[in-house]
Protein backbone atom coordinates (compact mmCIF):
# COMPACT_ATOMS: atom_id res chain seq x y z
CA UNK A 1 0.00 0.00 0.00
CA UNK A 2 1.46 3.34 -0.99
CA UNK A 3 1.74 6.05 1.58
CA UNK A 4 -0.16 9.25 0.85
CA UNK A 5 1.43 12.66 1.28
CA UNK A 6 -1.59 14.88 1.83
CA UNK A 7 -3.70 14.50 4.95
CA UNK A 8 -7.31 15.54 5.27
CA UNK A 9 -6.89 15.87 9.04
CA UNK A 10 -5.24 18.30 11.41
CA UNK A 11 -2.57 17.17 13.88
CA UNK A 12 -5.02 16.62 16.74
CA UNK A 13 -7.31 14.41 14.65
CA UNK A 14 -4.30 12.49 13.29
CA UNK A 15 -3.09 11.92 16.87
CA UNK A 16 -6.51 10.58 17.90
CA UNK A 17 -6.59 8.31 14.83
CA UNK A 18 -3.16 6.89 15.77
CA UNK A 19 -4.56 5.88 19.16
CA UNK A 20 -7.74 4.42 17.66
CA UNK A 21 -8.49 1.06 16.08
CA UNK A 22 -8.48 2.64 12.63
CA UNK A 23 -5.84 3.89 10.22
CA UNK A 24 -6.04 7.33 8.67
CA UNK A 25 -6.84 5.71 5.33
CA UNK A 26 -9.70 3.71 6.86
CA UNK A 27 -11.16 6.85 8.43
CA UNK A 28 -10.97 8.57 5.05
CA UNK A 29 -12.73 5.60 3.45
CA UNK A 30 -15.48 5.58 6.10
CA UNK A 31 -16.00 9.32 5.63
CA UNK A 32 -16.03 8.85 1.87
CA UNK A 33 -18.56 6.01 2.10
CA UNK A 34 -20.82 8.18 4.26
CA UNK A 35 -20.46 11.12 1.85
CA UNK A 36 -18.72 13.21 4.50
CA UNK A 37 -15.44 13.57 2.63
CA UNK A 38 -14.63 13.70 -1.05
CA UNK A 39 -11.19 12.19 -1.40
CA UNK A 40 -9.16 10.78 -4.25
CA UNK A 41 -7.58 7.41 -3.55
CA UNK A 42 -4.43 6.29 -5.30
CA UNK A 43 -5.07 2.60 -4.76
CA UNK A 44 -6.60 -0.04 -6.97
CA UNK A 45 -10.33 -0.62 -6.92
CA UNK A 46 -9.79 -4.04 -5.35
CA UNK A 47 -7.62 -2.61 -2.58
CA UNK A 48 -10.15 0.16 -1.96
CA UNK A 49 -13.04 -2.27 -1.54
CA UNK A 50 -10.91 -4.56 0.64
CA UNK A 51 -10.28 -1.55 2.90
CA UNK A 52 -14.00 -0.71 2.83
CA UNK A 53 -14.70 -4.25 4.05
CA UNK A 54 -12.01 -4.06 6.75
CA UNK A 55 -13.33 -0.68 7.91
CA UNK A 56 -16.89 -1.98 8.06
CA UNK A 57 -15.70 -4.99 10.08
CA UNK A 58 -13.89 -2.73 12.54
CA UNK A 59 -16.97 -0.51 12.94
CA UNK A 60 -19.16 -3.55 13.59
CA UNK A 61 -16.65 -4.88 16.16
CA UNK A 62 -16.50 -1.45 17.80
CA UNK A 63 -20.29 -1.27 18.16
CA UNK A 64 -20.45 -4.81 19.56
CA UNK A 65 -17.67 -3.90 22.00
CA UNK A 66 -19.56 -0.84 23.20
CA UNK A 67 -22.74 -2.88 23.64
CA UNK A 68 -20.83 -5.58 25.53
CA UNK A 69 -18.95 -3.18 27.79
CA UNK A 70 -22.09 -1.17 28.49
CA UNK A 71 -24.21 -4.29 29.05
CA UNK A 72 -21.71 -5.75 31.54
CA UNK A 73 -21.49 -2.49 33.46
CA UNK A 74 -17.87 -1.86 32.52
CA UNK A 75 -18.74 1.22 30.49
CA UNK A 76 -20.93 3.36 32.77
CA UNK A 77 -23.39 6.14 31.87
CA UNK A 78 -20.88 8.74 33.11
CA UNK A 79 -18.28 7.24 30.74
CA UNK A 80 -20.73 7.59 27.85
CA UNK A 81 -21.28 11.25 28.85
CA UNK A 82 -17.51 11.85 28.85
CA UNK A 83 -17.17 10.19 25.44
CA UNK A 84 -20.04 12.28 24.07
CA UNK A 85 -18.57 15.53 25.37
CA UNK A 86 -15.12 14.69 24.03
CA UNK A 87 -16.67 13.74 20.68
CA UNK A 88 -18.44 17.09 20.48
CA UNK A 89 -15.18 18.90 21.24
CA UNK A 90 -13.35 16.87 18.59
CA UNK A 91 -16.04 17.95 16.11
CA UNK A 92 -15.42 21.58 17.03
CA UNK A 93 -11.65 21.08 16.78
CA UNK A 94 -12.02 19.40 13.39
CA UNK A 95 -13.96 22.38 12.05
CA UNK A 96 -11.63 25.06 13.41
CA UNK A 97 -8.01 26.06 13.44
CA UNK A 98 -6.03 25.32 16.58
CA UNK A 99 -2.84 27.23 17.19
CA UNK A 100 0.08 24.81 16.77
CA UNK A 101 1.43 25.72 20.20
CA UNK A 102 -1.92 24.65 21.76
CA UNK A 103 -2.19 21.28 19.97
CA UNK A 104 -0.10 19.46 22.58
CA UNK A 105 -2.27 20.85 25.39
CA UNK A 106 -5.46 19.71 23.66
CA UNK A 107 -4.05 16.23 23.02
CA UNK A 108 -2.87 15.97 26.66
CA UNK A 109 -6.31 16.94 28.01
CA UNK A 110 -8.06 14.40 25.78
CA UNK A 111 -5.55 11.71 26.78
CA UNK A 112 -5.88 12.52 30.50
CA UNK A 113 -9.69 12.43 30.40
CA UNK A 114 -9.74 9.11 28.54
CA UNK A 115 -7.18 7.52 30.86
CA UNK A 116 -9.11 8.74 33.90
CA UNK A 117 -12.34 7.25 32.52
CA UNK A 118 -10.54 3.96 31.84
CA UNK A 119 -8.84 3.63 35.22
CA UNK A 120 -9.52 0.29 36.87
Image (cartoon, grey):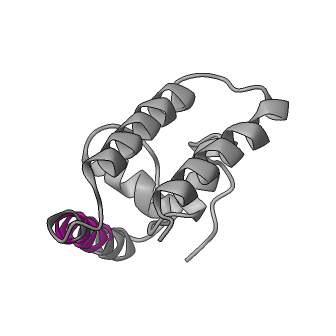
Would you say residue 104 is visible in this rendering? yes
| Residue 34: image location, x then y, percent | 25, 44
| Residue 21: image location, x then y, percent | 44, 69
Would you say residue 42 is visible in this rendering? no
Q: In this view, does 87 lie above or below 66?
A: above
Q: In which quarter of the image is residue 13?
A: top right
Could you say which is closer to the camera, residue 1 or residue 84? 84
Q: What stretch is highlighted in magenta?
A: 55-68
Main SS of residues in magenta: helix
Q: Residue at x 29, y 68 (%)?
A: 74
Q: Which residue is drawn at 44% across and 52% down?
A: 28
Farthest right residue in view: 101
Q: Quadrant of residue 35?
A: top left
Q: Residue at x 78, y 32 (%)?
A: 102
Could you say which is closer to the camera, residue 107 or residue 27? 107
Which quadrant is the N terminus positioned in? bottom right
Could you say which is closer to the camera, residue 34 or residue 42? 34
| Residue 64: image location, x then y, percent | 18, 70
50 left or right, relative to 43: left
116 left or right, relative to 5: left
3 left or right, relative to 26: right
Q: Is residue 95 above or below residue 111?
A: above
Q: Which residue is drawn at 66% across and 23% down?
A: 97
Q: Is residue 28 above or below residue 103?
A: below
Farthest top residue in view: 96
| Residue 73: image location, x then y, percent | 22, 66
Amino acid sequence: MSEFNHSNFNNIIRNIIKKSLFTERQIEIILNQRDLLESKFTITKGAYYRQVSQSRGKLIALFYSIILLRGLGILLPDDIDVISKLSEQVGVINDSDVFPEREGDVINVIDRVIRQACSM
